[in-house]
Image (cartoon, rainbow, N blue to C red):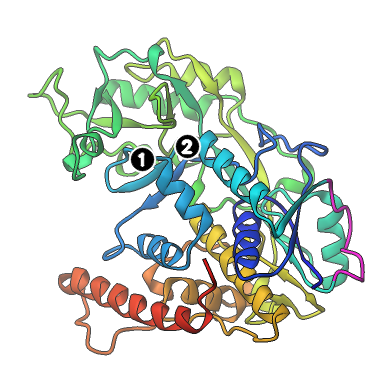
């Protein structure tokens, strides 16, 4: 049997390879690292997490991304299994220890009898004799491949900027000022209830911090980058600060649901939160602090945060250009390119935003490609499911003229006929969405269930 070729060993490509191989189809997974590096990756491991270490909410009853976790578990997803195996305390969220997470995925794929890992860049369109290809090259698609795709589609690739948050060594944080607490003490275990490290600011400290953000030296964009927009879900901290002096205090620095044990009678004016980045608890990332400030400015400004005056940074923030397709115009409902149907696309290059969404699209692409190879084509999941809602959106539900990257959310789901509208019935409505989705996803999965 001819193999399925998968280009890109990130979250989507790794998941696609696993799903196709588990279905009984041979796979060649092409990853350009370490032969060709990117500025954002630090290792040659598959499924390396280069930005946050959070897979966001794990609530599968009230949250769309938590529902997506549930669907991926039900489908035997490799990425979600590795995330569960290397989960860190994070309140109601699923955060992962990024290095062992990547090592686990790399090892499991390398050990799979139907997976071959090929290290080397695919610098143009795949050879004509590759009859089934999944392109999962992510936001950092190599310039040569991106140019070849643009030429094939006669479509200028859209792009936006993604920013990366800094990581701090725990031993450098002043615990005489900072404290552990999840917002509203959320979580079922003590570890979850103390998953976040909090640094309080009074009004004077907050105002000085905003002034410093606004005045800090920023990374200059090249001429061809100047009109590229940001993704709203990953705005640099200084871009948020420039929108208004109170923007941060009602965003990532909101002080609600937290009590400072060092001064319990004093309500903080703002609070900076850090989240554990590894299982040892030696590294913490600053939540919501994606930035395009220059490195010198970052250390100066971030050390203004109470508790971080002597912060040692394991990684400073950065910014990168993110390339994605106008999928509603270019892809069919099986994620194949209209201009060349042997090519499927998966992951962030299709215009989904987020680790979980990218892996989920890889899961679908891998299953669809394998089913096609085995002579029993697979329809996408119904739009009442999280995966189905997302793939329906990117392959036609969205307006091609205004298409921008999208996280999974209940706004993509068909309405519930019996649900009451309005905020008062929101919990009931969300539970209705997730109950319906689980039943419909299980029904979709059953005929296509792959051997373990």
x then y, percent, for residue 265? 7, 24
Residue 50 appears in the picture as rendered? no
**For numbered disc 1, what is the local secondary structure?**
loop
N-term-proximal mark, 1 vs 2: 2
In front: 408, or 372?
Answer: 372
Q: Quadrant of residue 359?
A: bottom right
Name the residue beneath numbered marker 2. Answer: 237
Q: Which residue is mark 1?
A: 252
User: Please, what secondary structure does the residue beneath circle 2 have?
Assistant: helix
Q: Where is 275 relative to 366, above or below? A: above
- 126 drawn magenta: yes
User: What is the CA distance from the residue labelled 1 to the residue labelled 2?
Assistant: 9 Å
Task: Reply above or below: 390 against 246.
Answer: below
Quadrant assignment, res 260: top left
Q: Nearer the viewer, residue 99 or 316?
A: 99
Q: Looking at the image, how many numbered discs can be counted on the residues? A: 2
Residues shaded magenta? 120-130
Q: Is residue 372 above or below residue 452?
A: below
Which residue shows up at 74% across the image and 38% down it?
38
Residue drawn at 32 percent across, 12 percent down: 174
Q: Is residue 380 magenta?
A: no
Q: Residue furthest right?
A: 128
Q: Residue 346 falls in which quadrant of the image?
A: bottom right
Task: Please tell me how crowded label 2 is: few (under 14), some (14-19), or many (20+) other residues with Cα within 10 Å.
Answer: many
Asked if the residue under mark 2 is in contact with the one under mark 1, i.e. CB atoms within 8 Å, the reply is yes
């Amino acid at each position: 049997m001819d193999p399925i070729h998968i280009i890109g060993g990130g979250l989507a490509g790794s998941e696609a390879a696993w799903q196709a191989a588990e279905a009984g189809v041979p796979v060649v997974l092409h990853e350009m690292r370490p032969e060709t590096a990117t500025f954002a990756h630090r290792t040659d491991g598959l499924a390396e997490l280069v930005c946050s270490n959070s897979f966001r909410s794990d609530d599968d009853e009230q949250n769309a991304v938590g529902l997506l976790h549930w669907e991926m578990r039900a489908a035997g997803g490799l990425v979600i299994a590795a995330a569960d195996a290397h989960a860190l305390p994070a309140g109601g969220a699923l955060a992962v220890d990024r290095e062992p997470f990547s090592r686990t995925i790399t090892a499991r794929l390398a050990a799979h009898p139907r997976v071959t890992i090929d290290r080397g860049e695919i610098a143009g369109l795949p050879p004509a004799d590759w009859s089934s290809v999944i392109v999962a090259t992510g936001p950092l698609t190599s310039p040569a491949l991106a140019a070849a795709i643009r030429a094939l589609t006669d479509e200028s690739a859209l792009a936006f900027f993604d920013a990366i948050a800094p990581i701090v060594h725990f031993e450098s944080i002043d615990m005489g000022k900072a404290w552990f607490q999840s917002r509203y003490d959320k979580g079922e275990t003590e570890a979850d209830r103390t998953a976040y490290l909090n640094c309080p600011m009074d009004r004077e400290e907050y105002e000085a911090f905003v002034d410093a953000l606004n005045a800090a030296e920023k990374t200059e964009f090249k001429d061809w980058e100047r009109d590229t927009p940001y993704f709203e879900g990953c705005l640099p901290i200084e871009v948020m600060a420039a929108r208004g002096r109170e923007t941060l205090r009602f965003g990532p620095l909101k002080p609600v649901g937290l009590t400072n044990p060092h001064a319990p009678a004093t309500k903080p004016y703002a609070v900076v939160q850090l989240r554990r980045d590894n299982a040892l608890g030696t590294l913490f990332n600053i939540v919501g602090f994606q930035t395009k400030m220059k490195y010198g400015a970052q250390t100066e400004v971030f050390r203004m945060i109470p508790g971080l005056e002597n912060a040692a940074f394991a990684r400073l923030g950065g910014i990168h250009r993110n390339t994605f397709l106008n999928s509603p115009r270019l892809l069919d409902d099986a994620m194949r390119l209209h201009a060349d149907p042997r090519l499927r696309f998966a992951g962030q290059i299709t215009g989904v935003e987020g680790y979980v969404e990218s892996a989920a699209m890889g899961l679908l692409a891998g299953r669809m490609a394998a089913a096609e190879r085995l002579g029993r084509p697979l329809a996408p999941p119904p739009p009442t499911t999280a995966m189905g809602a997302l793939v329906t959106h990117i392959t036609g539900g969205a307006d091609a003229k205004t298409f921008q990257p999208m996280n999974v959310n209940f706004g993509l789901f068909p309405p519930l006929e019996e649900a009451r509208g309005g905020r008062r019935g929101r919990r009931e409505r969300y539970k209705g969405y997730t109950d319906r989705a689980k039943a419909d996803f299980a029904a979709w999965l059953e005929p296509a269930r792959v051997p373990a």
